[in-house]
Image (cartoon, rainbow, N blue to C red):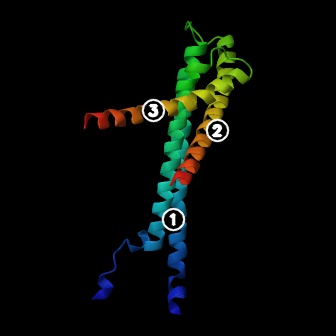
Amino acid sequence: MNYSSNNYGLSSNMENRKQAVMDQVRNELALANAQELINKINEKCFSKCITKPGNKLESSEQTCVAKCMDRYMEAWNIVSRAYISRVQRESNSQGESL
Amino acid sequence: MSSLLPKPNSNLEFDEATQKELGKFLESENARMRLQQSIHTFTDLCWDKCINKISNKIDRGEETCLTNCVERFLDTSLFIVKRLEETRKNLS
């Protein structure tokens, strides 16, 4: 009976620490994912838009990079949908054959 | 005597149920990360194959190309594994 009241402070403290660990993991993974995306966009859009690097980033190049960024993220979403639906189809058919 | 024993950082440990829960959480985050990493790889690969000119929107043709690109990449991967297995069987 005393157990829960004695440990109440401790267990809610543990709950908080658990949440903190989970939040930290989520944040770090989200950051890593964003960094990966930024690196890819940088690489792809640089090679598409800056064909002859001049002594400054031209406004036409900036326009191209801006568009390219949007297209890359669009492509990412299309690929994501295609891959996830494939994974789902595959795991469904595996379930049937077993 | 026992009052001397409690570990100074015992409040930094998790009980068994919480440890289990955290383990499950990490496993699922890990799986999500691997999935996202694959999507990055496919987007990289299929962008080069399917996107020639940067327009205002990805058009139907490009979208179909991206979808097919993912599907065929995975088919290729399965095909390679299958063929290697067959080669191995024929050898034995």
Q: Secondary structure at mark 1?
A: helix
How many discs mark residues in the rendered view? 3
Q: Disc 2 marks which residue?
A: A81
Q: Disc 2 marks which amino acid? A: Arg
At x 58%, y 50%, the residue is A92
Q: Residue at x 43, y 73 (%)?
A: B16
In the rendered view, tell whether residue B19 sits above or below residue B92.
Answer: below
Which mark is nearer the camera, 2 or 3? 3
Disc 1/disc 3 C-alpha distance (Å): 44 Å
The answer to whether residue B10 is seen in the rendering is yes
Mark 2 burial class by Cα count in 10 Å: few <14, some 14-19, many 20+: some
Q: Chain of mark 1?
A: A
Alpha carbons under labels 2 and 1: distance apart: 32 Å
Between A81 and B13, the residue placed more toward the observer is A81
**Residue found 61% across the figure and 33% down from its top:** A79
Q: Which mark is residue A40?
A: none
A2 lies left or right of B85: right
Q: Chain of mark 3?
A: B
* Residue at image location 59% in from the left, 15% down from the top: A48
Q: Are marks 1 and 3 on the same chain?
A: no
Disc 3 marks which residue? B79
Q: Chain of mark 2?
A: A
Secondary structure under badge 2? helix
Name the residue that disc number 1 marks: A18
Q: Is residue A61 above or below residue A98?
A: above
Discs 1/3, front: 3
